[in-house]
Image: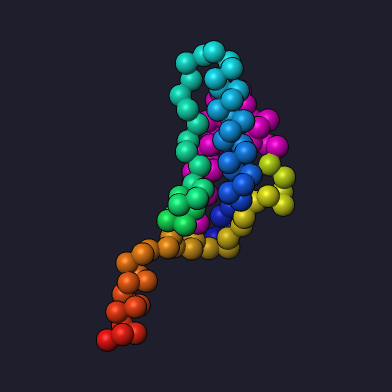
Amino acid sequence: MTPLFCPNPRAWHRVRQELDRLRRSAGKSISAPPVPLILNGWVFSSAQQKHDRWAETVVWANGAGLAHIVDSVASDEFVRWEHDEPAWLPEAVADDDAESTG
């Protein structure tokens, strides 16, 4: 399987802020870049979902002429998974708690 990757939340946030800033300053009516999966989006998303959303962001940036922004993420700012890791599910914790008290 091909590894999955995306920037760490801090780098992804920085990229999104810069993409938004440049989009607004261009004065064109360009759609907003994809929402980064950071904060709760990070916790509640699988590795595959994070990877896919980053890929959407790269495609968006290329289409908007802003590829240099996504290319500015340093290699040590990426998170890499060798396989998909599921998102955190609150109900799974509740089930575990019920089993331990039952």
Query: Is residue 48 in sight in this rendering?
Result: no
Left or right of 99 in this view: 27: right
Q: Eyeballing the image, is 79 above or below 102?
A: above
**At which x and y percent is residue 31?**
46, 24
Q: Eyeballing the image, is 46 above or below 28?
A: below
**At which x and y percent is residue 64?**
56, 23
Q: Quadrant of residue 11?
A: top right
User: Where does the C terminus fall, quadrant-wise?
Assistant: bottom left
The span picked out in magenta is 47-72
Residue farthest along the front direction in this orientation: 101
Residue farthest along the left direction in this orientation: 102
Q: Quadrant of residue 18?
A: top right
Q: Which residue is pictured at 58% across the width and 49% down the height? A: 9
User: Where does the N terminus fall, quadrant-wise?
Assistant: bottom right
Left or right of 100 in this view: 56: right
Q: Which residue is pictured at 62% across the width and 47% down the height? A: 10
Q: Which residue is pictured at 58% across the width and 60% down the height? A: 81
Q: Which residue is pictured at 36% across the width and 64% down the height? A: 90
**At which x and y percent is residue 87?**
43, 60
Q: Eyeballing the image, is 52 above or below 80?
A: above
- Figure label count: 0
Query: Is residue 76 in sight in this rendering?
Result: yes
Q: Main secondary structure of the magenta part?
A: helix
Left or right of 28 in this view: 102: left
Residue farthest along the top direction in this orientation: 27
